Amino acid sequence: MEEIKMSNQKVESLEALISKISYEIVSEGILEETEINKLLGVLANNGVYAMWVWARSRKDINDHALFNELMRVMKFVKEKSEEESFENYFQSISEDLHKLLFIKQLLEKTLIYARYHAKSLGD
């Protein structure tokens, strides 16, 4: 199994990375349970790009911190270059249906785990 290097830690699977990131989203105060539920709803009903646009429109969500965390998972499907904007990134992944659907699954799983972390922390 290929190892993914994160900071000083080695993560052995994408599943482990998703659980780590979902915990950090909650523990670092990036999202609260209500915001997570709303993001999940937008993602499920309207897709990845709509979720990004909705998060950007919310004053109560630090969208930059959120998408920097989520990018740690999404980069396994498609890297985002430093000069590429998030808008261009999300538009470009929509050109490949398989990548788009896989990213949607990764985001759903990450946000679902974050919701469970928020519940367990009493957020």
Image: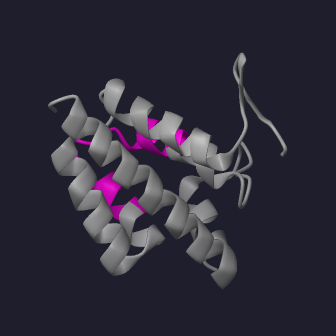
| Residue 96 in the image, given as x and y percentages of width and height | 69, 80
Q: Residue at x 61, y 70 (%)?
A: 102
Apparent side of residue 14 relative to residue 62 in the rendered image (left or right): right
Q: Is residue 58 visible?
A: no
Question: Residue 116 versus residue 42: which sits nearer the camera?
Answer: 116
Magenta portion: prevailing SS class: helix
Question: Residue 96 versus residue 87: which sits nearer the camera?
Answer: 96
Apparent side of residue 31 relative to residue 65 in the rendered image (left or right): left
Apparent side of residue 15 relative to residue 58 in the rendered image (left or right): right
The colour scheme used to paint the residues is: one colour
**Looking at the image, how many numbered discs can be counted on the residues?**
0
Q: Is residue 72 visible?
A: yes
Question: Residue 94 is drawn in which quadrant?
Answer: bottom right
| Residue 81 in the image, given as x and y percentages of width and height | 74, 48
| Residue 23 in the image, given as x and y percentages of width and height | 41, 33
Q: Is residue 27 above or below residue 51?
A: above
Question: Residue 24 versus residue 83: which sits nearer the camera?
Answer: 24
Q: Is residue 50 above or below residue 25?
A: below
Q: Residue at x 42, y 75 (%)?
A: 47
Residue 11 included in the magenta stretch of the image = no
Residue 67 included in the magenta stretch of the image = yes
Q: Is residue 90 above or below residue 25?
A: below
Question: Residue 103 is drawn in which quadrant?
Answer: bottom right
Q: Residue furthest right?
A: 2
Report the quarter where the C terminus lies.
top left
Q: Residue at x 38, y 47 (%)?
A: 113
Q: Residue furthest top?
A: 8
**Which contiguous range is marked in magenta?**
52-69
| Residue 43 in the image, given as x and y percentages of width and height | 37, 69
Question: Residue 93 is drawn in which quadrant?
Answer: bottom right
